[in-house]
Amino acid sequence: MKGIYNPPPLEGPHAAELTRIEDLSVTYDAREVPALAAFLTHDSAEVRAAALDGLVRLGSKEAAEPLRAASAKIKDPREAIAMLDAADYLELPPMPASMLRKRKESKASATPGPATSEPKKTTAVGGG
């Protein structure tokens, strides 16, 4: 179909799991959190990383609890920290509408500065 992106099929030993994670994460539906979270303790680091990315992409704060639970089961401390960081990120409060308006207004009223043509030349002090 024209206008629809169809990525090439994944290959490799975990292609089915990675495809499933991709399919779940692009629904942007919080009901998919348990299905994605099930991959957080998979034997493959590649699958775990994809699940983490998928949960962040899903964007649901309901993913924070399963991320914290999985982080306690992961042996690699870097992976565990990444899961905890993702949980913290997902629990951030939304930006207030007033702040969004101010950002939009400041961007609209900002005028571009003068273009710089050449770097300023400096002279050495004291000869040299």
Image (cartoon, rainbow, N blue to C red):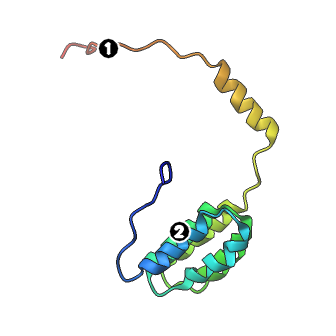
List x then y, in percent, for residue 69. Answer: 66, 81
Q: Nearer the viewer, residue 77 or 42?
A: 42
User: Which three-letter amino acid code belongs to the residue tagged 2?
Assistant: Glu
Q: Quadrant of residue 97?
A: top right
Q: Nearer the viewer, residue 29 or 67?
A: 29
Does residue 27 sit above or below 102 in this rendering?
below
Q: Which residue is mark 2?
A: 22
Q: Residue furthest left?
A: 128
List x then y, in percent, for residue 9. Answer: 40, 69
Kindly identify the residue that appears in the image at 35 percent across and 75 percent down: 11
List x then y, in percent, for residue 122. Answer: 30, 14
User: Which three-letter amino acid code belongs to the residue tagged 1?
Assistant: Glu
- Alpha-carbon span between mark 1 and mark 2: 47 Å
- Does residue 94 appear anywhere in the picture? yes
Q: Which residue is mark 1?
A: 118
Does residue 13 sit above or below 59 in this rendering?
below
Q: Secondary structure at mark 1?
A: loop
Q: Quadrant of residue 13?
A: bottom left
Q: How many marks?
A: 2
- Does residue 82 appear anywhere in the picture? no
Q: Residues within 10 Å of mark 1 (few under 14, many from 20)?
A: few
Instruction: Tell us which disc is closer to us: 1 or 2.
Output: 2
Q: Secondary structure at mark 2?
A: helix
Q: Residue furthest front?
A: 1
Query: Are dots 1 and 2 in contact, CB under 8 Å?
Result: no
Q: Which mark is residue 34?
A: none
List x then y, in percent, for residue 48. Answer: 51, 77
